[in-house]
Image (cartoon, coloured by chain):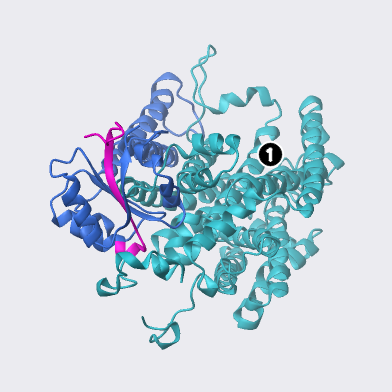
Chain colours: A blue, B cyan
């Protein structure tokens, strides 16, 4: 889809006056059956995931993976040297697996460390960040999305997207400054 | 719309004077965007000079040897480890505010978490200096890491000192990740407000293209929740592991099972005092009274009272156990703590500063009076340093054999290295305040009533013609 000026269309977007208005609008867009759309707000809005029809974030799976790998790494790094490579006789205590409580602190720390790294990098990975260019930045009003603006954009590649229908939906849901956002 | 006062059991709002979102953005970003006030330059010149002299002392100590410090047998650990425990403890308040209070859904944390987390990082940097330099041969410090080397030797993983290396470095790394994750939306705000090209470029790089999309917020909130969940046991573990450095020895006053919870409570106690020490002036200087309100100070004072009472209980329990154990050395060590050569450290530091001064916070008037709060915080800051000194040198200076008794006398290098870390800490904090938003904008906005998706219920949504008047009111 292209504008008369020849720009490729990314989405049709609207601004909403409040978090509550955006929340109600999101429910309407969800119920209209759109798939490729998003809302933008300066802070996470409580309940917006349900209003958009999104489920739980499975980022937690990556964190579980990270934590388990941290635990295993710690076990390897500790028991490898202490039991096999370089057994140290300290206080006459054995160097075998029965002394495991003394190894717990480092196992715990590495579990947390790897889990935290997993959470951090999965957040970037699952969000497709860092991404320094995005079509929404072409709309000058959009700079308020990180200040006090609430926006909703329905992408042109959504199978249900037609200019007239989307404009009507955005208008009916209370959207203001309805506009076409260019891809380039 | 129900008026605030008509609501049953109305809560005091967390952001006063019904400030809206753009006011919050404006005020908090303004601190970073406007030119530095004159007092900032004066303060920074002083703290940076002190920090520089502290770094000089470190260089002198490294190039000359640990003998430049007053440490000598029996006082093998002295100001250095005191400072280490002091600084690492201060960090704990930041993680408590950012992680534990987040899990407990304490929304008041949003006004203070960013600066408290920054304070955590700077405190851990100051802390890490001391054991790092105390090893003597700093260039051998890599032996602490389990790296294969051509001597074929490995660390002793059953040593609390090695646990400590892992605990502190994990703590620092996780705190950085948590802090940066929280910063991303605010860096995007600064990017979108930037007026110069260089600011736009730099904030743009670090904001990673954040655009406030809810599909991003969904994963972001899960990451934030899990980082909080991971940091909660972490913060409890760090000072527990620090206390193992002492508790796993056989020295009277160190060899106690009460140490881990006692240290953690003390760390949060001292940390909150430092948060208030930094925030009360910052709030006045940058006119943030609507965001960091008397209610916030009141709540932090209550936490100081709570943790101070934990600490008081632990101090008293130590005396009880020393008596109850029937152990001669243990009894002597605690008698010596109160009536020995370091008696006034106990009477001033532990008794007055840590046990008695926070008890003022039982009274609302004291919690609401900035000068009383500041006085108590200063007492706690000093008292917690004294506490660590009493534990460390107080435990060491009277060895088992009277022939090896000896006092600790700090040298000028000891004193200036410590003062230098105070300079490093305050310099870093001043730089942070200038270059990054000191209040988490995206989080504090969620504490405003308008952030609730049900604030104005569906029929009240203004029609398309009202053009945003609802928002700015």
Say which quadrant the N terminus of chain B sits in.
bottom left
The residue most toward the front is: A4
Q: Secondary structure at mark 1?
A: helix
What residue do we see at 38% from left, 39% from top?
A111
User: Which picture quadrant has residue B283?
Assistant: bottom right
Residue drawn at x 56%, y 57% as measured from the top left? B26
- Left or right for B272, reference B389: left
Residue numbers of the magenta segment:
A1-21
Q: Is residue B340 left or right of residue A135?
A: right
Residue B363 showing in the rendered view: no
Residue closest to the far top: B150
Q: Is residue B398 magenta?
A: no
**Is residue A130 shown to the viewer in this render?**
yes
Q: Against B124, is A167 above or below?
A: below
Which chain is disc 1 placed on? B
Residue A10 is one of the magenta-drawn residues = yes
- Which residue is at a point 36% across and 64% down the rendered structure image? A18
Mark 1, residue position: B130
Q: Position of residue B52 (x, y in %)?
A: 79, 37
Outermost residue on the right side: it is B412
Residue appearing at x 73%, y 69% in the figure: B375
* Residue B321, image quadrant: bottom right
A18 or B207: nearer the viewer: A18
Q: Is residue B35 above or below residue B443?
A: above
Q: Nearer the viewer, residue B217 or A152?
A: A152
Residue A82 locus on image (x, y percent): 43, 26
Q: Position of residue B198 (x, y in %)?
A: 60, 34
């Amino acid at each position: 889809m292209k504008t008369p000026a020849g720009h490729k269309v990314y989405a049709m977007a609207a601004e909403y006056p409040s978090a509550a208005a955006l929340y109600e609008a999101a429910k309407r867009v969800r119920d209209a059956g759109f798939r490729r759309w998003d809302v933008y707000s300066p802070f996470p809005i409580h309940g917006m995931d349900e209003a958009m029809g999104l489920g739980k974030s499975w980022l937690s799976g990556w964190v579980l993976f990270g934590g388990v790998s941290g635990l295993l790494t710690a076990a390897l790094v500790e028991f490898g040297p202490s039991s096999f490579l370089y057994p140290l006789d300290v206080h006459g205590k054995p160097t075998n697996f029965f002394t495991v409580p003394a190894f717990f602190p480092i196992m715990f720390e590495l579990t947390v460390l790897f889990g935290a790294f997993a959470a951090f990098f999965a957040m970037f990975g699952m969000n497709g960040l860092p991404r320094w260019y995005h079509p929404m930045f072409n709309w000058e009003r959009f700079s308020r999305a990180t200040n006090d603006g609430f926006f909703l954009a329905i992408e042109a590649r959504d199978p249900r997207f037609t200019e007239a229908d989307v404009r009507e939906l955005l208008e009916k849901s209370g959207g203001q400054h309805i506009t076409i956002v260019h891809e380039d | 719309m129900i008026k605030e006062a008509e609501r049953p059991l109305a809560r005091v709002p967390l952001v006063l004077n019904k400030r809206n979102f753009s006011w919050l953005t404006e005020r908090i970003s303004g601190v970073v965007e406007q030119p530095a006030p004159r007092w900032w330059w004066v303060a920074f010149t002083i703290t940076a000079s002190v920090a520089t002299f502290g770094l000089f002392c470190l260089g002198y100590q490294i190039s000359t040897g640990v003998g430049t410090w007053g440490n000598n047998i029996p006082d093998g650990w002295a100001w250095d480890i005191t400072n280490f425990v002091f600084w690492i403890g201060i960090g704990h308040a930041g993680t408590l505010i950012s992680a534990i209070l987040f899990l407990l859904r304490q929304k008041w944390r949003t006004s203070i978490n960013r600066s408290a987390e920054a304070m955590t990082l700077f405190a851990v940097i100051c802390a890490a200096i001391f054991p790092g330099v105390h090893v003597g041969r700093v260039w051998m410090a890599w032996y602490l890491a389990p790296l294969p080397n051509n001597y074929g030797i490995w660390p002793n993983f059953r040593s609390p000192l090695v646990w400590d290396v892992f605990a502190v470095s994990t703590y620092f790394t996780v705190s950085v990740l948590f802090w940066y994750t929280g910063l991303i939306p605010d860096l995007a705000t600064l990017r979108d407000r930037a007026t110069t090209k260089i600011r736009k470029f730099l904030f743009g790089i670090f904001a990673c293209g954040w655009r406030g999309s809810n599909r991003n917020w969904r994963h972001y909130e899960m990451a934030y929740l899990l980082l909080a969940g991971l940091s909660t046991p972490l913060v409890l573990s760090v000072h527990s592991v620090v206390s193992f450095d002492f508790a796993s020895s056989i020295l009277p006053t160190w060899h106690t099972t009460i140490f881990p919870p006692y240290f953690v409570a003390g760390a949060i106690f001292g940390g909150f005092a430092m948060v208030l020490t930094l925030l009360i002036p910052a709030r006045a200087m940058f006119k943030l009274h609507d965001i960091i309100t008397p209610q916030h100070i009141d709540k932090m004072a209550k936490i100081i009272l709570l943790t101070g009472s934990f600490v008081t209980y632990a101090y008293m329990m130590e005396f009880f156990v020393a008596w109850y154990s029937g152990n001669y050395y243990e009894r002597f060590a605690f008698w010596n703590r109160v009536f020995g050569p370091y008696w006034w450290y106990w009477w001033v530091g532990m008794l007055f500063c840590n046990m008695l001064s926070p008890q003022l916070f039982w009274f609302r008037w004291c919690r609401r009076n900035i000068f009383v709060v500041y006085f108590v915080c200063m007492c706690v800051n000093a008292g917690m340093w004294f506490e660590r000194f009493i534990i460390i040198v107080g435990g060491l200076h009277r060895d088992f054999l009277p022939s090896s008794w000896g006092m600790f006398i700090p040298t000028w290098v000891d004193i200036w290295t410590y003062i230098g870390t105070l300079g490093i800490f305050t310099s870093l904090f001043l730089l942070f305040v200038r270059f990054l938003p000191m209040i988490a904008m995206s989080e504090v906005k969620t504490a405003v009533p308008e952030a609730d998706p049900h604030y104005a219920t569906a029929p009240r949504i203004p029609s398309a013609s009202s053009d945003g008047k609802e928002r700015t009111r």
